[in-house]
Amino acid sequence: PPGKFFPLAITPFGYSIGICQPPKSASFASCFWCHSYSGDFTLLIYRVGSAFVKSLKFTSESVGSTLVFAVSSKKNQLEVLGKVNGTDTNNLAKVLDRLRFAAKPDEVIKFPLGEKTIVATGVGAWSEKFDSEILRRAAGAAARALSGEKSATFIFPAKSSTELSAIAEGAALGSYQFSDFKATSLKEMKAPLEEIVVKTDLAKSVDTKAIAKRVEILAKNSYLIRDLINTPPSHLTPI
């Protein structure tokens, strides 16, 4: 709005090599709405001038039909991190092994399994405690592979609010997409992920509202910077 300025945030270098899209990718929001219920927290994100609405939700119960699992490699065997009722993670690990999934960082594979759509994203070698940047990059890589999906549930090993925040940041920033000047290929593009659900047992024990607010600030300003970079000078004039 005239007379108002949005603060710009400089993102760490890791964002540009990990969870960001390639150079020609998109924009995010300038308006946000939040509400909480039953200990869970939902952040709705709306980008002005765009046709889609996104939401970021933390919950300990809700699981959809598209599941995103972090997968590590432990003693030459795959280990699926996280469990969901109705999904046999041991069988899932065997399926991934047959598909020659190596669980390397930034490696992602997507396939149907029964009535579910499974997305596996690699986090490298198994560890008792994964670095937040590893979780952030893994969530971002998975989000980039989820274009065209309405909703996805991220099932990652989060043992602290810092790790939970990293997962949410990765998923939000990885959904970045820029389409303003792609007139010829716009019809072929799939819409970015609309709803991000982070399933965690911490949903009712940590301040998810504060986490969502932090993700809001990082995502909004990171997307704004990307918009400015991706907009050609002929359209991004001083006035």
Image: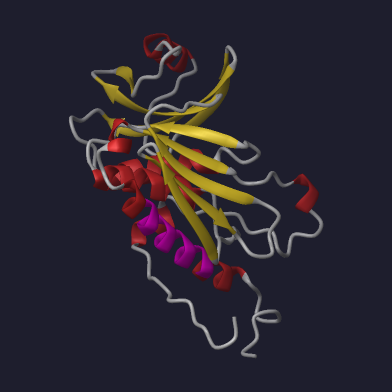
Along the horizontal axis of the image, is 226 left or right of 179? Answer: left
Looking at the rendered image, the quarter that the N terminus falls into is bottom right
Residue nearest the viewer, comparing 123 with 204: 204
Along the horizontal axis of the image, is 152 left or right of 121? Answer: right
Q: Residue at x 31, y 42 (%)?
A: 164
**Which residue reaches farthest front?**
38
**Which residue reaches farthest left?**
128
The answer to which image quadrant residue 205 occupies is top left
Q: Residue at x 53, y 47 (%)?
A: 55
Q: Residue at x 57, y 36 (%)?
A: 151
Q: Which residues fall within the magenta stretch? A: 212-224
Q: Does residue 3 lie above or below 226 as drawn?
A: below
> What is the image's colouring?
secondary structure
Looking at the rendered image, the quarter that the C terminus falls into is bottom right
Q: Position of residue 216 (x, y in %)?
A: 43, 58
> Is 7 within the magenta?
no
Q: Position of residue 174 (x, y in %)?
A: 49, 49
Residue nearest the viewer, comparing 91 with 164: 164
Q: Residue at x 59, y 44 (%)?
A: 194
Q: Position of residue 105 (x, y in %)?
A: 37, 38
The answer to which image quadrant residue 31 occupies is bottom right
Q: Position of residue 107 (x, y in %)?
A: 44, 35
The answer to which image quadrant residue 158 occupies is top left
